[in-house]
Amino acid sequence: MRFKDQVVIITGATGGLGADAARSFAGEGARLLLVDRDDGAALAAELGARFHRADVTRDADVAGYVQVALDAFGRIDVFFNNAGIEGRVAPITELTEADFDAVMGVNVKGVFLGLRHVLPVMLRQRAGAIVNTGSTASHVGSPGLGPYVASKHAVLGLTRVAAVEAARAGVRVNAVCPGPTETRMIRSLEEQAAARGLNDARERYMAGIPLGRYCTPAEVTAAVMFLCSAEASGITGTHLLVDGGRTGAPSSSAIR
Ligand SMILES: NC(=O)c1ccc[n+]([C@@H]2O[C@H](COP(=O)([O-])OP(=O)(O)OC[C@H]3O[C@@H](n4cnc5c(N)ncnc54)[C@H](O)[C@@H]3O)[C@@H](O)[C@H]2O)c1
């Protein structure tokens, strides 16, 4: 019960990673506000949580979910700033301004707005822990994913700046950087790659992962919960990769 009675906000809460984290935080005693643009009422009912529908790209919506948390619970201890989209898979030369804006809107502006509205609450409390969701795409390039890779690099930049700005108030800000993980998003990426002629996309992705498989949402959640817990009290402004070794040894699949 590491999070007993702590107030936790999760964005992207009805998605694969968000819902898994919601179940685990609930299982460790947290009081939860789940936020998503899709309906999360059923998940909230299952977990005894609150749900608030919001678009993380809209400042008023973000201010709204922070106010809902404060009205319901009076404080915010943990913020999992996690909503994200993959966007359209295509080379930069084929992508449009709208493709770019859509991905940057959710993955960068959404993360920024979450920090902008949650940090003042935590700074007043002089306590709090935030985890932003990065990716292996925060660290390496990936063909066909220009806006996504740019957006996830930016998430690390925001994480570092927020961490140093908040540190003296006792507020920690870190990122979790998953590799391919078993959720809707990786299925979408596989399907889009297949539609562009990469029929064995799943096998090729896995061949580049030293562990030889995708990670599970539970493995990512474990890292998120560690970073938000008292055990990580000395850790801020950094990231934790949960990627099966993908970025540590990108060519390891060649020799076994
Ligand atoms: N699955 C992977 O392989 C993987 C790898 C690295 C990073 N990530 C990151 O993990 C995070 C969670 O992704 P996931 O794998 O659970 O995918 P997912 O598609 O299952 O979940 C994403 C959630 O974000 C929500 N969302 C999207 N746009 C939103 C908006 N404007 N406002 C509010 N909610 C919005 C969606 O409705 C969805 O519930 C994302 O930031 C993603 O980039 C995923």
Image (cartoon, rainbow, N blue to C red):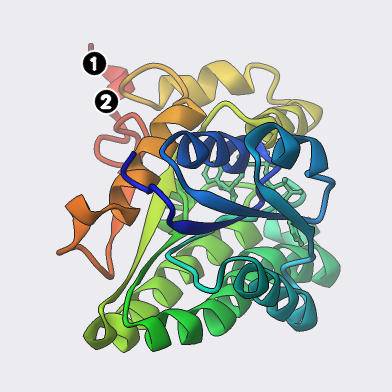
Please indicate whether residue 203 sits to the left or right of residue 189 in the image. Answer: left
Q: SS of the residue at dot 1?
A: loop
Kind of residue at disc 2: Ser
Answer yes or no: disc 1 within 8 Å of ligand 1. Answer: no
Residue 244 falls in image quadrant: top left
Quarter that holds the C terminus? top left
Callout 1 crowding tier (Cα within 10 Å): few <14, some 14–19, many ≥20:
few
Report the front residue among 206 and 220.
220
Q: Are marks 1 and 2 in contact (CB under 8 Å)?
A: yes
Using the image, tell me which numbered label, if any, was put on residue 255: 1
Q: SS of the residue at dot 2?
A: helix
Report the front residue among 168 and 179.
168
Find the residue positioned furthest to the top.
256
Q: Residue drawn 25% across and 40% down? A: 248
Callout 2 crowding tier (Cα within 10 Å): few <14, some 14–19, many ≥20:
some
Kind of residue at disc 1: Ile
Using the image, tell me which numbered label, if any, was put on residue 252: 2
